[in-house]
Image: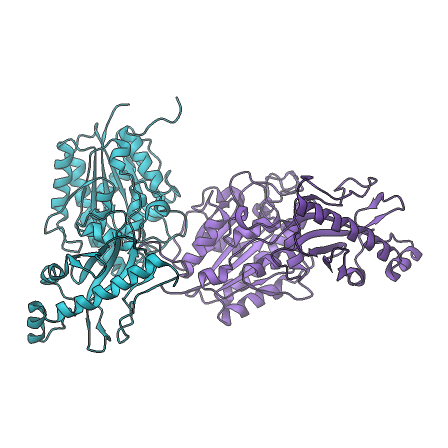
Chain colours: A purple, B cyan
Amino acid sequence: MRKRQGILIISDGLGDRPNKELNGLTPLEKANTPNLDKLVAEGICGNVYPISAGIRVGTDVGHLEIFGYDSNEVYPGRGPLEAISAGIEIDDGDIAFRGNFGTIDENNIVIDRRAGRIRKDTDLLANSLNGMILEDGTEVLVKELTDHRVAVVLRGEGLGKEIICTDPGTACEGEKLVKPIAIDENDVKSNKTAKNLLEFTMKANKILKNHPVNIKRIADGEEAANIILTRGVGQKKYMPKITEKFGIKAVCIAGDKTVYGIANLAGMEKYAEDDFTANFDTNIGKKAKKAVEYINKGYDWVVVHVKATDLAGHDNLPLKKVEVIEKIDKMVGYILNNVDKSKCYISFTADHSTPCEARDHTGDGVPTIIWGEDVRKDDVKVAGEKYFMNGSLNNLTATDIFMLQMDFMGFTKKRGA
Amino acid sequence: MRKRQGILIISDGLGDRPNKELNGLTPLEKANTPNLDKLVAEGICGNVYPISAGIRVGTDVGHLEIFGYDSNEVYPGRGPLEAISAGIEIDDGDIAFRGNFGTIDENNIVIDRRAGRIRKDTDLLANSLNGMILEDGTEVLVKELTDHRVAVVLRGEGLGKEIICTDPGTACEGEKLVKPIAIDENDVKSNKTAKNLLEFTMKANKILKNHPVNIKRIADGEEAANIILTRGVGQKKYMPKITEKFGIKAVCIAGDKTVYGIANLAGMEKYAEDDFTANFDTNIGKKAKKAVEYINKGYDWVVVHVKATDLAGHDNLPLKKVEVIEKIDKMVGYILNNVDKSKCYISFTADHSTPCEARDHTGDGVPTIIWGEDVRKDDVKVAGEKYFMNGSLNNLTATDIFMLQMDFMGFTKKRGA
């Protein structure tokens, strides 16, 4: 089969609902998007479910599905994904957690789950804990993530993952640090993990409260990052690399660590720069240029991720979301004008919907386009959730869209003969 | 439930993409198809996925899905299917291969994988090998197929199927005959098969090179068909007959041996004549007449298969594909004019898309119609991939279409009460 290239643009949390501030339009319908409209008019489109109708997904699960995985089979939980995003190479028996630097008082009451949203010097705090050896020989790996976030991995013999973690949870400030226990009291392996997590947590508290970074924070009137609150426990799962399965060379251009962590697991290279911030100030123009550069270098599949649409959704900022979409449209325009139409498909989708008024991910379908010279064209001419309901891709799933891209590019295997 | 009859017309590889030679239309959109248009205007339509979006299938897997099977469950590999097409009744323990008559030199180098595309007297060559008993008592069944193709079955105790076969593969002429080995050297059963396949291959070579057919071929300056190259090894899988499952009497009218082999497995009778060639010169008019005859004889389901659309796709002949489609349209017209509308549904589909410019099967949906007096009508009026995107069957699957036909005909069982 002849081979082609493909670029996939992912606008995180793009999908929305009719919004009062936008006179009943969605941000995508409201935005001025001549380039997305061109993709729509010359391609196929639809609102596509990340998994199936009404199933809400996180960024991690949404991206697994966009990369063609059955997340039910491969999703290891957020802990292992965050550890991978942090650059920790987790092994088969490791138990991984996502965590926050938090603040507790002398009675172990959680005063602040994010230690005053600490942003600086968390690398120094993490380093002071990384490599700790517990009583039974289990090693603890600790690595800072964005802002107050941190990844924790227990590495030792015979550890289980069925435990209650230490974080009392969102909106539970003022409650006590949770004592970790195995969910089933007869589960020897998980009991061992719970004991180790408790030991680590208390030893970490001792080290952190005397750490120079925290002594300075207290002197400055800031909250001490004197505890690590863990949640999202999990273990690595077998996940075949799509780059090997389909025989493609692929790269993910992104500022969001979760996204490129998953892309990495899928076998893709990652490309990030300091001004790819996973925030409103991310350098979208540079992402577009990099995408075209990778296509010119001969990469088969180039994925470009923009987080800001999701942030606008969570913060209920519909006008901001419109603004971000118009920036993304310019990125699409640059790509459209700079790739060889006869050799490259351009696709556009989202990992989930984050409607502004809902301020959270919902199970609505996500606006999706596949454009290319020999793609059958449907009748839709303009980008927007309400128009895409008439599109030929409507009600398909994220993995359908992945398979269609691989098939257009010529990398699917024929079943049968 | 009241019973009705149904005719299904399968246009192999029909689905296509916008084609430059046809001013951006597909062959089906370009063709003049008054009868298909009538089916569309009075029925329901859509582009239907053989399995799901972007999954490429072969003719064999595509037809299994059209006949309502989950090919993942029942597909036995090409070897057993070819053996069945050749008329060999394979048993549970048998190991079946598809093969070619080929030409090797005295050093076992493959000179020609198809023995100069031999077309004549392969029955004599196959007969000279059929029934060979190997050292351990295993019997070999050999039966010619179309042109240079041949089916080989090993029948004996304790044979496994996980082996590397003898054919060095497409585009590997000039390489040596492959020595068959078990993929896992500790797999006793597959080792036994590999040893038997080697013994058969060398004994067959001895018999074939001295065969009068080959002596004459050499005298005529043609290549000797002195070896059988095997591939596609497999074993029979359990496959319930749809004729029994649904209680229908069904027949498949086809010139293509793979297709009527699968139809046979599904429990259908086959009807073929010499001028049903599985080629451009097939007698489409006669197929239409036969279909009506079978309906008049009281058969519940009559399947008519035309291969030529697929051939035109593989050969990148869009105008030829248009011509074949117009012939098929006449067949549809004959059927429409000669069946009792109040008793018979007419359906139309393809096993997969073979877009001319791709020259291979792709994972695009296939144009599909269901017509009948009491079928709900959608708004589509004209046959063509782009119109069918608005059809009510769009994005369904081949097995959905099978179930709809069985249900219209009144042969489905109610789940629950």
Q: Residue at x 58, y 61 (%)?
A: A264
In the depicted view, which residue is nearer to us: A170 or B93? B93
Q: In this rendered view, identify the residue nearer to me: A366 or B263.
A: B263
Give how far across and how far down residue B39 sits, in percent: 26, 38
Quick one: B204 or B369, which is closer to the camera? B204
| Quarter of the figure that contains the N terminus of chain A | bottom left
Residue B86 point in image, percent of width and height: 18, 52
Residue B56 visible to the viewer = yes
- Between residue B45 and residue B195, name the one nearer to us: B195
Q: Is residue A19 left or right of residue A384?
A: right
Left or right? Give the position of A372 relative to B35.
right
Q: Position of residue B178 (x, y in %)?
A: 29, 69
Please say whether residue A144 is visible from this viewpoint: no
Q: Quadrant of residue B404?
A: top left
Q: Which quarter of the rendering shows the C terminus of chain A?
A: bottom left
Q: Looking at this rendering, what residue extends furthest in the top direction?
A: B417
Q: In the current view of this chain or complex, which residue is farthest to the bottom?
A: B107
Which residue is at 79% across, 47% downward? A113
Q: How many marks?
A: 0
Task: Using the image, determine if residue A360 lies above or below residue B203.
Answer: above
Residue found 34% across the figure and 55% down from its top: B17
Q: As displayed, is residue B64 above or below residue A412? A: above
x, y percentage for residue B378? 35, 35
Q: Which of the 4 quarters of the picture holds residue A179? A: top right
